[in-house]
Image: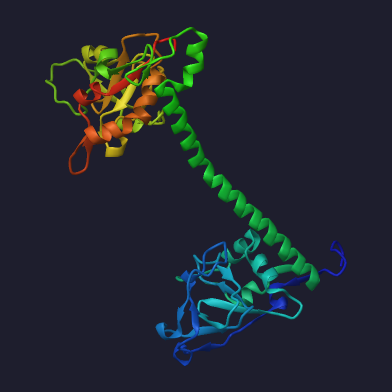
Amino acid sequence: MSGLPEGWADTSLGEITVLRAEKLDPRSMPDAPFIGLRDIEPNTSRVLKTSKGSDVKSSVARFSAGDVLYSRLRPYLNKVTVPDFDGIASAEILVLQPTIATEAEFVRRRIMTREFLDFAALLDKGDRPRVNFKEIAEFPVVLPPLPEQRRIVAKVDGLTARTARARTELDRIPNLIARYKQRLLALAFSGELTAAWRAQNGAPDQQVDEMPSGWKIKPLHEISEIQGGIQVGKKRSVDVTLIDVPYLRVANVQRGWLNLDEIKTISVTPIERDRLLLQRGDILMNEGGDRDKLGRGWIWNCQVLECIHQNHVFRIRLNDPEFPPEYVSHFANENGQKYFFDQGTQTTNLASVSKRRVAALPVPVPPTEE
């Protein structure tokens, strides 16, 4: 036919399949495997489970191995399978028997296309929308010869398998990245990452208290100033002059990044504003939230002008302005997680860590240049 390869034909679903309209009482086949609507995994055609006819109360449709089962009820229009066994199915499943000129798996894949799903979605109507065979029988199908149908099915199966393998490999990447990052930071905070740098710069190759020469373990308060934030909803006298300023909440301070999509404002006095004003390079660290999120944070780089922070977010400002704050924040996010988890306190709905505990966080401190 015009526009088609030799041997191919323009046809329709109703011309290449026959509806098995046989309905029966499941008690007549109590041991037959039963497939319900929820037993078919959407988009994959995998049969998740079967039960027995004796477990079913309503009438069922009978099918044979190689029949195409199609769910006609919304929201299950993306469920279709070809069982390799005889059995019974929900009455809401259309049982389509392919003709001798049609490969069942070819029909299944045609029904699984977005084109067919959109076609069927336009047909369902009523309080319990469903399609019927007479309607979907009009769906156009371009049919190749039977041997070519089988080759197409085999090719699609091969490509689908490759896609599944690729997806499996991609799913492994986040775990590999997390393990790589964990290992990298462990090397950084033990001094191994910069061992070659120390050797090139003439630093003594020796360990003191399991730290490289020149390194010291110091509590956070010895290398920084730690500041709590403003309490939201703080009561004030009516004669106090207030100004509105943006402020950071726990939701803004994530582990290793800042979520600044929504910045709220708060009314404070000019003195409070000046005391809590964030500066470039300040380390932000959460005081409250879920227990496993205590101490998470990142660096402030003046993304919002004249911004302060609430009382559930600590501000850590390093004494040495040349020391990179990212080093401390990376350490708190990675190695500090267990410390904050152990040192935090838990109420019914919220965990928190005190300023005193944050101040006591032991940080391995290398020379600033290192």
Number of numbered callouts drawn:
0
Q: Is residue 213 left or right of residue 340?
A: right
Residue 270 picture quarter: top left
| Residue 357: % across, % down | 21, 26
Q: Is residue 144 left or right of residue 321?
A: right
Q: Is residue 200 visible?
A: yes
Q: Quadrant of the C terminus?
A: top left
Q: Is residue 139 visible?
A: no
Vertical placement of 369 versus 265: above or below? above
| Residue 19: % across, % down | 63, 81
Q: Quadrant of the N terminus?
A: bottom right
Q: Residue furthest bottom?
A: 28
Q: Nearer the viewer, residue 338 or 191?
A: 191
Q: Residue at x 63, y 72 (%)?
A: 136
Q: Residue furthest top?
A: 202
Vertical placement of 275 versus 129: above or below? above
Residue 99 picture quarter: bottom right
| Residue 308: % across, % down | 30, 20
Q: Residue at x 75, y 81 (%)?
A: 100
Q: Residue furthest front?
A: 206
Which coloring applies here? rainbow
Residue 186 picture quarter: top left
Vertical placement of 122 versus 54: above or below? above
Q: Residue at x 71, y 65 (%)?
A: 153
Q: Nearer the viewer, residue 87 or 341?
A: 341
Vertical placement of 209 versus 116: above or below? above
| Residue 367: % across, % down | 39, 11
